Amino acid sequence: MPKLLIVDDEDKFREMLKKRLELRGYDVIALDNGTDAIKVTRNDSDIDVVILDRKMPDMNGEEVLADIRGFRPALPVIMLTGHGSMRSAMETGKLEAYAYLEKPADLDNLVRTIENAREDKLHAMARHEIAYVEKGSIWKWLKGSHNTRPGIIILGIILFALIAFTPAPDRMVSLLSWEKTGDVSQDLNAGYASYRKMQQDENVAEYYSRYSGMQKTVTTEDGDKIKEPLEPKQVAFKAKVMLGILVLAALFWASGAVPIGVTALSVGIFMYFFGVLKPDDVAQAYAKDAVIFIFGVLAISNAITKTGLDRRIGLLLLGPAKTIPRLLFIFLPLFGMACSFVSEHALIAFVMPLFMMVYVTSIRAAGVKKDRYLAVMFALALCYAANCGGPGSPAAGGRNAVMLGILSDYGIAPSFGEWVIYGLPFVPVMGLVIAAYFFFMFRKKIVLKNVNVSALVREASDKIGPMNKNEYITAAVLVVLIILWITSSNFLGMGGPVILCIVILNIFRILRWKDIASIPWDVVALYASAAALGKGLAVSGGALYLADSFVNILPDFFKSGEGLAMATSVFTGVATNFMSDGATVSAIGPITVPMAKISGTHPWMVGFATAFASSFAHMMIIGTPNNAIAYTLAKDPVTGEQLVKLSDFLKHGAAVLVLSFIVLWVWVFFGYWHFIGF
């Protein structure tokens, strides 16, 4: 039964109200003072709603409410008073009282308010990141709820222990023991991410020891202490730890077992305590340029939304989108092609706030509380179209630059134009496939089927009138930002220019520190942990072992020609959802490109297949900043509810991943590539 707490110093009123509410099916605790009320609410987590008298002798209602808010911020409190005034209503409003009712309250009105408060409690818990765990059995406790799933936590720890503490496979030890000869076609460890940095006759274990400073101290017969590299089996343990962290983090992120930020921090905790890298190196692994970029883009998106510039950008981009089908089938392919040449992360950051504005305006105009499927369709369709713009040109992302570097080692790197010829035709076709998927999957599920996106954007733009000074300044800063990204990212990175623009916007008092501090730091931590995870897997040899294991289980058909390209694309496409795209290409490309040469397959075919599939990070939000940005912004502005969940990425991302493979194989490998030739 719903459990209520009544706090009122008038005995007759309190007892009468208690009996009447019990007849309505409530479990009621009645107290006559605020001191006891604070103790009970602090220790009894089953209380659903508090009905609190404002005027009591020991503590007044505002004081009790303030204390309750300190340790139970999501618990709804209904204030009752016979001395109502606008001033007291304002005072309680500051402390987030759920409702303010005159005493004695009409019972039916009070019951309606209680039920509304119970419904709102779940939203309040979500806003305050408090897990709701259904009680009643050990199974319900193990199942838990979002951000608190004890069963998944226990399973993850068991899987980590099994991976980390079982003996290292012989193949892993062989890969870490193999000495570099310089012949990439013969070296077993040619796929090691730092292979080119290794010295002649040095193995991975020795390089790892030198790079990480993890040498062991040995006392010689003369009593001298010298540094020696770790044994391959010792480094294999570090690699297995990283593989265990990968499984643990992927499981937690996919299931929502703990908050995503806590999982992100856990990656570093495991790396610290198992000595994968030294403390400073673990911290450095978190502080990648891509992480600074994510932070900066989220802050810049606040400025775009705050000034109203998102609406002006929307007028340019979404003019043809008068209906949902036109939005999907016209806008998405064009958006994907734009992402082939301009940072897709930046475009997502500019457009996603606009889509959420359209969503909010639509549901308000229709008088609907929410249309979650519409929000999911907007966010995921935009994400996946941006992701699939990756194959279009070398400018689409760092993963393509990594592959160009690998191919250049063989003296066969394609030019910019050649890459565009082989990659760009994939993008609009994939955009149409994504549009068709979301159209047929969501057309019956969404509540608002006749959303005129173009009209809503124009109406929202007209409401705020002509552009003002702040918008012009913000627009100029954005133009500078894009120019710096295009012309100077090779030496400034993607993070440097965006930090510069944040400082400029702050100087002009457009983006205040409060706006910057309000960004969702858990998502920044998540992407930082993905960078650290990729670094640990790469340097320890864990990624090398994964890639090598995959290649070795391939049937003969998949060891040359289109078969090798298909196999490479599958492994890359799956792996890129759990590692950064650049780390994935770094781990897989050096293995598959030599295989292509050995088997008589043109290296471009396998190189392009690897780079293209590294764009298919649709399932996990750690796979690409696009997903992280969209996930962060897809929240209900009123309730704070996360409209797009991790499970949405997993479910729809898996389907779009399969569709991406089909288009890549049918349209690209066995399609226009046969006409272009190699």
Image (tube, grey):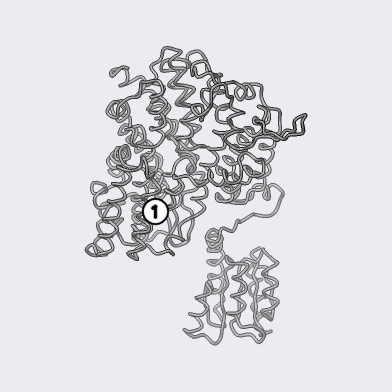
Residue at 37 percent across and 23 percent down: it is 666
- Quarter occupied by the C terminus: top left
Query: Which residue has dot 1 on it?
Result: 499
The answer to whether residue 3 is above or below residue 431 is below
Give the quarter of the image for residue 250.
top right
- Residue count near mark 1 (Cα–Cα under 10 Å), binned few <14, some 14–19, many ≥20: some
- Quarter occupied by the N terminus: bottom right
Residue at 46 percent across and 61 percent down: it is 517
* Near-viewer residue (658 or 489): 489
User: As drawn, is 202 to the left or to the right of 349?
Assistant: right
* Residue 606 in picture, x, y percent from top left: 41, 22
* Near-viewer residue (204 or 251): 204
* Residue 305 in picture, x, y percent from top left: 35, 58
The answer to whether residue 658 is above or below residue 57 is above
Residue at 77 percent across and 31 percent down: it is 222
Residue at 41 percent across and 34 percent down: it is 399
* Residue 49 in picture, x, y percent from top left: 60, 69
* Residue 307 in picture, x, y percent from top left: 31, 62
